[in-house]
Image (cartoon, rainbow, N blue to C red):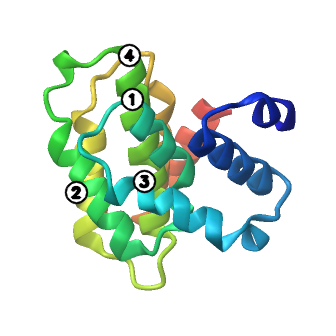
């Protein structure tokens, strides 16, 4: 990844790769606050969502405060509704964002059940294709654990492994 970052000419992509490297090395808490601010600034200047911006969001969600992330994700959920209009790449990015957001929602001290339900509903609306099967199954695993349905969670865990 470092070689990829070194050869990358796009500054935003380079910063996202650096964040990914920090996550992989367990150094995310030490990641530059200036780079985080630069990444966040990208979304405040965003005129419309596209695969590149979805990719950036899917890989940087944990740098946001929950309230800011809630606004960004709900913007994505609102914008991308007619799944027949999107190719597999976009569908996969939407599924990744949805799964990541669900995991973040469920990790909050005060879980916002409305956001959990909105995210669950969006996950269920995503097409049932092999492209996003993993994300849909893993999302259902998280939801089963959240609802203390350990029998279902165990069955899903066996499928995932």
> Closer to the N terminus: mark 3 or mark 2?
3
Location of residue 53 (image quadrant): top left
For mark 2, give the secondary structure.
helix
Mark number displayed over residue 88? 4
* Proximity of marks 1 and 4: CB atoms separated by less than 8 Å: no
Quarter occupied by the N terminus: top right
Label 2: which residue?
A: 118
Q: CA distance from mark 1 to mark 3?
A: 14 Å
Label 1 or label 3, whichever lies nearer to me, is: 3
Residue 111: x %, y % from top left: 38, 77
Mark number displayed over residue 6? none
> Closer to the N terminus: mark 3 or mark 4?
3
Q: CA distance from mark 2 to mark 4?
A: 22 Å
**Is residue 148 something one can see in this rendering?**
no
Q: Say left or right for 14 vs 50.
A: right
> Closer to the N terminus: mark 2 or mark 4?
4
For mark 4, give the secondary structure.
helix
* Crowd class of label 4 (few under 14; some 14 to 19; many from 20; radius 10 Å): some
For mark 1, give the secondary structure.
helix
Mark number displayed over residue 51? 1
Q: CA distance from mark 1 to mark 4?
A: 11 Å
* Proximity of marks 2 and 4: CB atoms separated by less than 8 Å: no
Residue 33: x %, y % from top left: 65, 73
Q: CA distance from mark 3 to mark 4?
A: 24 Å
What residue is at 63 percent from the left and 62 percent from the top? 35
Label 3: which residue?
A: 42
């Amino acid at each position: 990844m470092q070689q990829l970052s070194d050869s990358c000419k796009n500054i935003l992509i380079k910063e996202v790769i650096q964040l990914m490297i920090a996550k992989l090395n367990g150094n995310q808490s030490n990641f530059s606050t200036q780079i985080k601010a630069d990444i966040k600034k990208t979304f405040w200047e965003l005129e419309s969502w596209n695969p590149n911006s979805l990719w950036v969001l899917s890989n940087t969600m944990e740098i946001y405060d929950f309230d800011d992330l809630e606004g960004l994700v709900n913007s994505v959920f609102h914008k991308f509704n007619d799944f027949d209009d999107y190719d597999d790449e976009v569908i996969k990015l939407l599924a990744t964002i949805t799964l990541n957001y669900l995991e973040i929602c469920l990790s909050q001290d005060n879980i916002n059940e409305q956001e959990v339900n909105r995210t669950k509903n969006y996950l269920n609306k995503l097409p049932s294709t092999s492209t996003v099967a993993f994300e849909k199954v893993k999302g259902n695993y998280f939801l089963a654990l959240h609802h203390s349905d350990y029998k279902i969670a165990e069955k899903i865990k066996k499928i995932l492994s």
